[in-house]
Amino acid sequence: MSGETSARAVNSAAPATRTVQVVRFFARFTREQRWEHWLLFGSFTVLFLTGIVQKYRNEPWSQNILSTPERLELVQNIHHIAAIVLTLEVIYHLARGIYLLARRKMPHAIFPDWQDVKDAGRMSKYLLFLTKKTPKYGKYNFEQKLTYWFLFFSIGLMVITGFIIWFPIQVTSVLPGSIVPAAKLTHSTEAIVAGVFVLIWHLFHVVFDRLNLSMFTGRLNEDDMRKYHAAEFERLTGEPADTPDQGGQA
Amino acid sequence: MVRPKLLLPFVIIGVLLVVWGLALNASSTSAAPLGVDRVSAPPAQQTEQYCLSCHSDPNLKTTLPSGEDLSLYISPEHLKSSVHSPAGIECEACHTDIKTYPHPAIDYQTKRELSRSYYQACQKCHSANYDKAQDSMHAQAAAGGNLNAAICTDCHGAHDVQSPNQPRAKISQTCSRCHQDIVDKYKDSVHGEALIQSDNPDVPVCTDCHGVHDIADPRTAQFRTQTPEMCAGCHADPERMSKYGLSTDVYSLYETSWHGVDISVYKANWPTIWHESAVCTDCHGIHDILDTNNPNSSVNPANLLATCQKCHQDAGPNWTSAWTGHNQIDAQRTPFLYAIDRFYIQFAQVVLWLCIIYVVLQIIHAIVDRVRRNLK
């Protein structure tokens, strides 16, 4: 698809009259949001790797890594440091959300609505070759919203259960004891579910489906906006997103 | 003239008799006592009567250089009822240095020195067990200077060697001769009580946990990390546990617990490094293990918190309910945990398959699109 885009750019640049090709970019993520993503990316990766080594520390492959008691302690310490980084990021994220809500400045684009359900149905039809058109997505499509909210609750659960099993004595001085084995089971299982989700769902969509680096660059070019966020493009520019040469392909 | 043909049957019968006699002789010599490492046929000794002609005198004694009186009396009854004498293994088999009267002079300073010298004769026939004993905690203690550490004859006897485990309670009695304080605790434990009161064949006696001849030091890191597996030898055996209504899940669930995983990692990787994670005996006790329903049991709900606090000093009253007590996740006992477990079994599958199906559909669609474009 990106091949098609560049071919079109060459064609339009071909005429002898040197028209300047202006590529419009659309802001997508703020600097703060990109920083948050870096923190999340780093801490999540470290937590996942140091976590599965501990979860499977009865397995030979894990025992090769945890070859001395000091290594085991080191891995646990790294896990805890990354946990603190992630926790601070979560606190910042929630605090910013509350601030925006209080100021009535919370952007509504990330919140799921009925349109997402319809989009999901439409997209499923498209994938099953029952229709030729993909849905016209807003700023975030339902796949991206699902990614955000799935990880929002997964990470929330991981942080809460993680602290319960990190400080079981303090926790049980307030809460009933049964919360500890429940937290352990949840932490251990949710980690795998979230890890699988990120590896299959998120990684596929941002790398293999199309390389989408907007979370690192902060912006998206006009072609991608027209194709993948047509409704948002139309809202921002007032122009129709469909260009003649794109036809039914979106 | 006697016809040679008439003699033939007698010759044949005679030959057969001789062969049969030889065979009988051979089988009787090979019928040595069970468990004996057969070196050769025991010497057909006639020494016992000869020796007893003097040594059956109860007043026969000598004085050692240490000043100890050494009784030289051998009770003929003890000798006759031992396992050796009836099997034809008589005095000279062990007292190899004494072949006649007058005896060679005794050059042992003390009675203990004499015992520690004579017990080496056991090796002649029982070499495997003798060698094991040389690697034991007892041999180590002796090498460290404690000459009272047990040797073969201390446990088995000398002239009155009997089967050591008939009845089984005899084993703990034997050990109690030196380890009285421990056997006293054991007697009141759930295991010891069943052994002593009803000769229960399922409960462990000292040697079941500590080993027989190669008794190891139970205070080492190795012994510690092997403890759960040792207990599981009986407590994970459905046949044995079903008689008492005890769960056989205790070991498999322990293995997946925090304590158990830690211990199994140490056992596999660092068996010689001490690790504090709890093993069975830390909570249940060692020689004084009681039925968990016994109000005095360290793991009885009434005492559990105090037991946890041995390691988790700051634990509060809610702490013990964090312990699922070697039980499977269960709808009645742990409903919260059960609900989470059921949820994740479904949820994990749903997430995994939805992700896979959706992504695979996208890949298929992208391939079809590309093929169509190329065909245009």
Image (tube, helix red, strand yellow):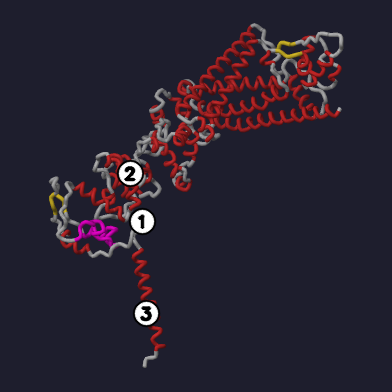
Task: Confirm whether circles 3 and 2 share one chain.
Answer: yes
Q: Are discs 1 and 2 located on one and the same chain?
A: yes
Check the picture and name the quadrant holding the N terminus of chain B. Answer: bottom left
Q: Secondary structure at mark 2?
A: loop
Is residue A133 visible in the rendered image? The answer is yes
Between tags 1 and 2, which lies in front? 2
Circle on res. B35: 1
- Asked if the magenta segment contains residue A32, the reply would be no
Q: Does residue A138 appear to the left or right of B127 in the view shown? A: right
Whole-percent x, y for residue A233 in the image: 78, 13
Respond whether the residues carrying marks 3 and 1 are from the same subunit.
yes
Dot 1 or dot 2, earlier in sequence = 1
Q: Which of A17 and B88 lies nearest the eye of the viewer?
A: A17
Locate residue B294: give its quadrant.
top left
Amino acid type of the residue tagged 1 in the rendering: Gly
| Residue designated by label 3 | B14
Label 1: which secondary element: loop
- The residue singled out by tag 2 in the image is B136
- In the depicted view, which residue is nearer to us: B189 or A119? A119
